Amino acid sequence: MARVCHGREPLRAEFLFDLSCPFSYLVCERTERSFDVLRWTPAVRATAPPDPDVVRSAAEARAAALRLPLIWPESFPAPVPAAMRVAAHASAQGRGGAFALAAGRLAFCGGFDLDDPEILAEAAAAAGLALGDCLSAARDERHDDAIGAAGLRLLAAGADRLPALRVGRSLFWGEREVGDAAATARRLTAAAVR
């Protein structure tokens, strides 16, 4: 996908993700390359989780189609609250994308438990984050409210799954919508340039 810019200013987009979600992992790589300015927002699903066996089957099929590796963490489908807190911290530091990419690769390419402090340290190092700050953020439950609120805002907007992309006023959710989000961004850019 092409980088998308809005006139002289890059078009801003927001990527909402859950590090325990294999579809968020599948989208991270493509999303990072699609937008110059991307706000990374950790969010948790605000609805009941789907059947883990259905998720595994669908994610394995998509990973194969995209030619991406997929190894299941032993803890799947358990949430990873410590990793999500660090993701919130990383996003506030402007390193959300680097952390999400590193964490996703550790979880779904290596099968590692993201809530293990040693694994969090690896992801933090890969993202260029200070280890002490990340380990402190992992224990800071104050991040949980913002992460939960992001999921509730998505649900209120009609999004019933993660990941999600907000481009301008448009919201796209689900792994297969990345292409539509990028196409919308290109249309918005073309309209702004005219």
Image (cartoon, rainbow, N blue to C red):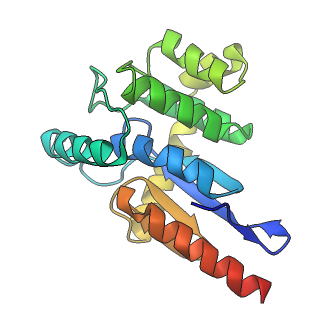
Q: Is residue 115 left or right of residue 137?
A: left
Q: Is residue 140 left or right of residue 164?
A: right
Q: Is residue 159 left or right of residue 91?
A: left
Q: Residue at x 32, y 32 (%)?
A: 70
Q: Is residue 172 left or right of residue 93?
A: left
**Which residue is nearer to you in this view: 157 or 68?**
68
- The picture quadrant where one finds residue 134 is top right
Res 37 visible:
yes
**Which residue is nearer to you in this view: 177 or 116?**
177
Determine whether 44 is above or below 89 in the image. Answer: below
Q: How many marks?
A: 0
Q: Residue at x 28, y 22 (%)?
A: 75
**Which residue is nearer to you in this view: 33 or 152?**
33
Residue 11 in percent (x, y) is at: 72, 67
Res 142 visible:
no
- Position of the C terminus, as image quadrant, is bottom right
Determine whether 32 is above or below 183 in the image. Answer: above
* Residue at the top extreme of this rendering: 118
Residue 88 in percent (x, y) is at: 60, 38
- The picture quadrant where one finds residue 100 is top right
Q: Residue at x 60, y 57 (%)?
A: 34
Q: Residue at x 72, y 56 (%)?
A: 37
Determine whether 89 is above or below 189 in the image. Answer: above
Residue 99 in percent (x, y) is at: 60, 32
- Position of the N terminus, as image quadrant, is bottom right
* Residue at the right extreme of this rendering: 8
